[in-house]
Image (cartoon, rainbow, N blue to C red):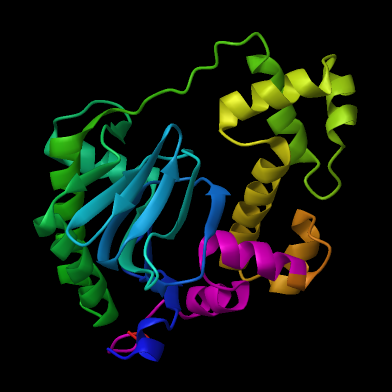
């Protein structure tokens, strides 16, 4: 692979119509960095080239080929290239419902499962994850669904337990939760930190500390992530990016484009086009 080819970035974030409850991302990133964010569902990622550096609460992982990265819902994390040539990966984003369904089928876990490892060396599962993508891209939903459930079941059987509940020991835990609710309700016109603290009867610093401990990021970072998540739901429903930007509180579409691309990994226009298609023509994505 030549230097230019090796440093070219490409990404495809999509859904297959016959694989409900699953998002797929296959990409090669070099300069792109994911800011701190979290997901509604799970992340199961197979690095296929280079090194991905993942920042998790209390640790930083370096994932290379043959490794599988496992992230539970609502766990804040970052990602960036760990080597100059970047990293390539195939990622599955299964919903909570899909994970719970597979867990019930294999019968080894009760309630909502959660991964107990952040990264495992498992070349077999890494290959299966890439095969899920290939089968879906080829339009073979039967094979993709079979391989998907096999990979998820293997990870749940070997590396899962009850989903951990994040507990906040500080007295400000309820203030943090009330602040989150207020920011969700007033996303388009959020209050300042001082205004929010005054409304909740606390101080800005105490609220900031409690919020960071509860959600793993300060309120303004959480709000940007929450806006992008809501924008995704709007785009899923067919809303135009310019309209979605205004609804969630971004100043304009370029403002949405910048944050959406950083957090999701593809621009909102490309994301919406994939959602509108819901099917894939046989063959790999561009630059794959």
Residue drawn at the location 57% of the way across and 74% of the way down: 272
Depth check: give the residue in front, 152 or 209.
Answer: 209
Is 249 situated left or right of 224 in this image? right
Depth check: give the residue in front, 75 or 137.
Answer: 75
Q: From what the image shows, is residue 118 above or below residue 175?
A: below
**Residue 247, picture quadrant:** bottom right
Is 200 situated left or right of 266 in this image? right
Depth check: give the residue in front, 157 or 209.
Answer: 209
Quarter holding the N terminus?
bottom left
Residue drawn at the location 40% of the way across and 49% of the way down: 54
Q: How many marks?
A: 0
Is 127 situated left or right of 98 in this image? left
Q: From what the image shows, is residue 199 above or below residue 188?
A: above
Q: Is residue 286 visible?
A: no
List x then y, in percent, for residue 68: 24, 52
Residue stretch in magenta: 255-284
Residue drawn at the location 43% of the way across and 31% of the way down: 58
Q: Is residue 213 visible?
A: yes
């Amino acid at each position: 692979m030549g230097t230019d080819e090796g440093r070219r970035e490409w990404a495809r974030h999509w859904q297959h119509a016959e694989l409900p409850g699953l998002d797929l991302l296959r990409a090669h990133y070099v300069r792109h960095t994911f800011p701190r964010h979290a997901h509604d569902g799970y992340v199961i990622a197979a690095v296929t080239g280079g090194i991905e550096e993942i920042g998790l609460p209390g640790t930083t992982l370096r994932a290379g080929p043959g490794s599988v990265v496992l992230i539970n819902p609502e766990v804040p994390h970052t990602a960036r290239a760990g080597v100059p040539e970047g990293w390539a990966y195939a990622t599955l984003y299964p919903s909570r419902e899909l994970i719970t369904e597979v867990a019930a089928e294999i019968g080894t876990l009760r309630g909502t499962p959660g991964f107990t490892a952040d990264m495992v060396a498992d070349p077999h599962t890494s290959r299966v994850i890439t095969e899920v993508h290939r089968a879906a891209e080829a339009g073979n939903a039967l094979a993709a669904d079979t391989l998907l459930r096999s990979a998820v079941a293997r990870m749940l059987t070997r590396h899962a337990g009850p989903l951990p509940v994040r507990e906040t020991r500080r007295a400000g835990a309820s203030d943090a939760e009330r602040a989150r609710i207020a920011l969700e309700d007033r996303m388009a016109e959020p209050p300042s930190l001082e205004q929010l603290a005054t409304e909740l009867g606390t101080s800005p610093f105490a609220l900031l500390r409690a919020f960071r401990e509860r959600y793993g990021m300060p309120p303004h970072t959480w709000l940007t992530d929450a806006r992008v998540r809501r924008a995704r739901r709007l785009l899923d429903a067919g809303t135009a990016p310019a309209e979605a930007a205004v609804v969630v509180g971004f100043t304009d579409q370029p403002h949405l484009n910048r944050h959406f691309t950083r957090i999701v990994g593809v621009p909102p226009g490309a994301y919406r086009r994939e959602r509108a298609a819901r099917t894939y023509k046989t063959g790999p994505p561009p630059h794959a």
